[in-house]
Amino acid sequence: MLNIILNTLIFIICCALGYFKAQDYQCRVINLQSFLDGLKNLEDEILYRKTPLPEALKIVSDEKANNAAKNLFSNVSADLKGNNNCSFIESWFKYTEKLDESCSFTTEDMYTIKELGKVLGGTDIYGQSAVIQRAYKQIEKQLEQAVQENNTKGKMYKGLGIAIGLTIVIILL
C-alpha cells in the first residue's frame, strides 16, 4: 500500500515539474499577446484621441491592458504623474527590468520593449504612432516564435515529465 502511494506521488511530482517548466513558454505567449494588445490600444489613445502619453498609459493600463503591459504602463504612468523627478526613459527602463524578472521574456523581447521606450514620447503624435507600429510588428514576429516554441518545447517538457515519472515508477516496481 505504501509502495503504491509513493509511486503515485513520484509520478505526480514528475508530471508537475514538466508542466511547471512548460508554463514558462505559455507565460511568454500570454505576456507578448498582452503587450501587443496594450500597444495597439496605446497607439489608438495617442493617435485618435490625442491623449498625452502619461494619461494614455494610465487609460490603457486601467481599462484595456492586462498582465505585463498593464504592470508596465501603470507603473510608468504613476512615475510620470508623481513627484519622482524621473524622465520617461528612466521610468520605462526601471520597470522593464522588473518585467524581465516575472514575464519569461527572452533577451530579444526585452530589447524590443526597451527600444520602444527610448523613442516613445520623444516625437510628435505621428512619430509615436510609427514607433509603436514598428515595435508592434517586431513583437508580432516574436509572438509567432513564442507560439512555435510553446507548441514544441512546451509539449516536450510536459511529455518528458510524464515519461520520467513513469520510468521511475517502473524502475521502483
Image (cartoon, rainbow, N blue to C red):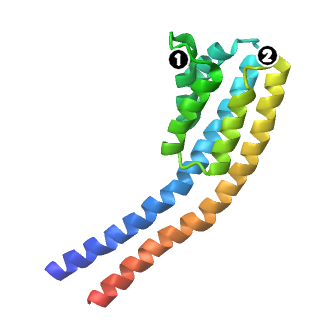
Label 2: how many residues lie within 10 Å, few (<14), some (14-19) or many (20+)?
few
**Label 2 residue SS:** loop
Label 1: how many residues lie within 10 Å, few (<14), some (14-19) or many (20+)?
some
Q: Nearer the viewer, residue 97 or 54?
A: 97
Task: Name the disc covering residue 48, or none.
Answer: 2
Q: Amino acid at mark 1?
A: Ala
From the top left corner, tell me how far across and down residue 9 is, in percent.
Answer: 26, 71
Q: Residue at x 76, y 31 (%)?
A: 132
> In the rendered image, is residue 39 in sight?
yes
From the top left corner, tell me how far across and down residue 111 is, in percent.
Answer: 67, 43
From the top left corner, tell me how far across and down residue 1 is, in percent.
Answer: 14, 80
Asked which quadrant contains residue 154, the reply is bottom right
Question: How far is the residue under mark 2 from the one under mark 1?
Answer: 23 Å
Task: Name the disc covering residue 126, or none.
Answer: none
In this rendering, the answer to whether 132 lies above or below 161 is above
Q: Earlier in the sequence, mark 2 or mark 1?
A: 2
**Label 1 residue SS:** helix
Q: Which residue is mark 1?
A: 78
From the image, state whether disc 2 or disc 1 is nearer to you.
Answer: 1
